[in-house]
Image (cartoon, rainbow, N blue to C red):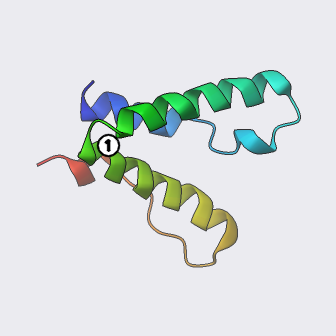
Amino acid sequence: MTPQEFFKLLTDHDWTYNYSDDHRAWEKGKNESHRLQAIIQEVPLYTKMYNDYSDYVFKRLYDDASPDKPKIEDYLC
């Protein structure tokens, strides 16, 4: 999997699936989350991408000073 493909998984992921009332949406989000977790165990760059994107999603929900949205260019040399 290329960094671009992994980044697309991050941007398409439903990060708030755990709050869903729809069991199908929750199940889909849980499965995607498990897949992402498995992938980041193998590639350190993907771990950083995951953590940065997660920070972006959740800190903007709860903090006034949210980080900038990550871009794929941030991770390519």
Say which of 73 and 27 sits in front: 27
The total of numbered circles placed on residues is 1
Which residue sits at x=71%, y=38%?
17
Q: Position of residue 66 (x, y in %)?
A: 54, 71
Which residue sits at x=43%, y=55%?
51
- The residue that mark 1 highlights is 46
Circle 1: residue type: Tyr
Left or right: where does residue 77 sit relative to residue 14?
left
Local secondary structure at mark 1: helix
| Vertical arrangement, residue 73 with respect to residue 12, above or below | below
| Vertical arrangement, residue 33 with respect to residue 57, above or below | above
> Is disc 1 surrounded by few (<14), some (14 to 19) or many (20+) residues within 10 Å?
many
Q: Position of residue 61 (x, y in %)?
A: 67, 63
Which residue sits at x=51%, y=54%?
54
Q: Quadrant of the N terminus?
A: top left
Question: Dividing the picture into quarters, in which one does residue 22 lie?
Answer: top right
